[in-house]
Amino acid sequence: MKKKSPTIQDVADRAGLSKAAVSRYLNKSIRLPEETGQKIDDAVRALGYRRNSIARRLSKGGSETIGLVVPEISNTFFSEMAEAVEQTVSERGYNLILGISRNHPDKELGFLRWIDDSIVDGLLFVTNRPDNRRLQLDIRRYRAVVLLDEDIPGTTQDKVFCHNIEGARDATRYLIRTGHRRIFHVTGPSSLMSVKERLEGFRLAHQEAALPCPDTHIFHHDYTQQFGREVARKILSSPILPDAIFAASDYIAIGMLEELRRNGVRVPEDMSVIGFDDTSLAELVTPKLTTVRQDAAELGRIGADRLLDAIAHPEVRHGVTRIAASLVVRDSVRDRRLSTRDIRPPTALSPSPEPPPKNQS
Amino acid sequence: MKKKSPTIQDVADRAGLSKAAVSRYLNKSIRLPEETGQKIDDAVRALGYRRNSIARRLSKGGSETIGLVVPEISNTFFSEMAEAVEQTVSERGYNLILGISRNHPDKELGFLRWIDDSIVDGLLFVTNRPDNRRLQLDIRRYRAVVLLDEDIPGTTQDKVFCHNIEGARDATRYLIRTGHRRIFHVTGPSSLMSVKERLEGFRLAHQEAALPCPDTHIFHHDYTQQFGREVARKILSSPILPDAIFAASDYIAIGMLEELRRNGVRVPEDMSVIGFDDTSLAELVTPKLTTVRQDAAELGRIGADRLLDAIAHPEVRHGVTRIAASLVVRDSVRDRRLSTRDIRPPTALSPSPEPPPKNQS
DNA sequence: TTTATTCGTTAAACCGGTTTACAAGTTAAG
DNA sequence: CTTAACTTGTAAACCGGTTTAACGAATAAA
């Protein structure tokens, strides 16, 4: 009953050949005469032979597996990314192994070790938290690592980000153009690249319009729904309300939306909100969230390509790749150029002199 | 520059011992005198030795990795499950490798092969589609497989489902108790176990209340948002509208919510809606979705435990485990026992004679 | 006819561990 | 004083492939 699976030796015996011949034939690293090949094929079929990938990995020195490390997977941004990565790598004959770091440094370091342990040939790395230089120093030792979405300063690996500055600038321009003057920016920890860049875009748009943009309009903490709720409460308790909020992530925006509604503030009638990322949630909430689209799937696809390239050709470097970040207009921004009291559904927006910068939803 | 990582042999040399001694010491399969152990520890530290897990797997015959196969990961139900599985298995020293089947039979079969290829020691399997017996026949050959959420008839592996019948019955009871009389059930393909069971619960509640439940109230297709939208359109075009809808998945419910709103049907004022699963989306939509909670994370945790047990003790079987399915009351159901025209926000529901069956949100 | 080349194939080393079987050296029991 | 039973450690086989170096035979070139 303990029928263990046939080995390459069994196949060789049955075909009357040697292990080596079979191995090389099966890997197409040699061309054998028609007849010999036929014998091998027959033996393989008869025995139901399947090569043992572990043994193969040991002698080849590779695992044909890559890892994707994300802070969490139950966040649609990351799960959409994971889906794209899985598809991309499986098309190229690789397996995907998933690591969830929960932003714990130790876990992240542990996943890096996967490379040493030859569990994976390379790693797609997404981190969400400010680095204390520990990760930076560690990660630099690895060639086959590609950073996605967020930078780790001081690293030299290939990276794929979105055009944060342009995306944030366009979103802010849009708010300004639609008549908003007092805009708050609610964002993550100030040491993150994405936070800095989005803030830069935010400031840029203000400068262009010669609008003030004091630090009191900026709220830093992290990219969570929880923070969105907290900051909404805080803002509501202050004397002067903003007329618009640019949140640096959909999760923040959604948390704020909830809390604003709970407190009777109508969006977009009383306050406009723009998010960032365009996760699938943005279309689901009420009002549908106007947001800056950053295609998680594209991030994943390009990242996977980069990584696989880096594994195949260690000498080639792509550096930083940027994908588009384009405004998607939905229902959470009101056009305030109309009379302040005259509220219309946002679908009835009067045509802009300049149309919104990028694609509509 | 080509400094390859040290092997166990290097460690042995440096410690003046044999490979075997080092290996056994490191695996704690032998107790060595203080001093000898110290020498090994020193050598390991000095060399920065890390064991090669591929080599280890080859000789041990296991991969210390399990696989999770889901139809898609960008569905929060599955990603929440994945998150829990990852956490559980990593606590027990296992890796998780992710397979996304997109409900393609070939992909599913391919993932099963992972077991033959000793890529994984076992598989957590979630499938969403009716089986044509192909998968059933194949899957039976594998011992280390646990089915989650949905059955594949004819298989004998351990399985973890939720109490579909009870969950559906409670949801339907609740609708009936709150005064709904014409309830439609919108659900997936009729061959799926979860569909059959939820339908059974739906019928049960009708019987108890001596209410008719004709087949024209049942709409089968699949568990997607898309189907939700389609069926909403279809229902709206028919002469008599239902006063409530019990959707067998949150995704269906959310699709319907959208389409109903688009057509000016107010939920819950004009029509009540209940979903199933309680994904994180349920709290996000407007109105917040009343739904039957099936804890994806718990499904994942228990499934992972079962699988790891099955790998460790192949002789033990747990059979089918059921987790709770309990109604979570939110805002998408109206209490119609009040005057038909007197509409109040659902938070102002008059206290029920019998309170809603389970936990509130 | 002799020398090269190519073709088809294989023995053996190798990847880096784990595990079995057994050998000295010590200690305990009879 | 033997014999049995631990201790401490090792040599060698093994896991199941891939790859290198080389060999005999056949074909081509000189």
Image: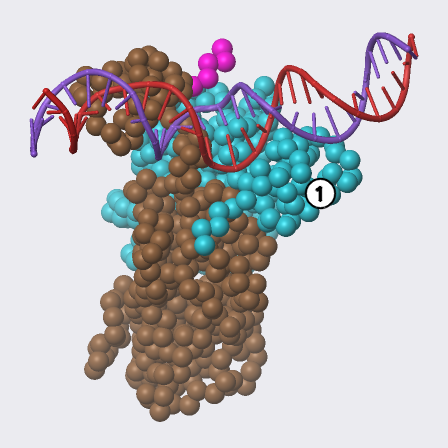
Chain colours: A cyan, B brown, C purple, D red
Q: Regarding mark 1 in the picture, which secondary structure is present there? A: helix
Residue at (40, 61) in percent of width and height: B157
Q: Which residues are magenta?
A: B1-5
Counting the numbered discs, the total is 1
Task: Provide the residue designation for mark 1.
Answer: A39
Is any part of residue A124 visible from this angle?
A: no
Q: Chain of mark 1?
A: A
Q: Which image quarter holds the N terminus of chain A?
A: bottom left
Q: Main secondary structure of the magenta part?
A: loop
Residue at (36, 83) in percent of width and height: B204
**Percent x, y for residue B133?**
55, 66
Looking at the image, residue B242 lies above or below residue A222: below
Residue at (48, 47) in percent of width and height: A4
Looking at the image, residue C9 lies above or below residue B229: above
**Foreground pick, B286 / B98:** B98
Q: Is residue B4 magenta?
A: yes
Residue at (47, 33) in percent of width and height: A120
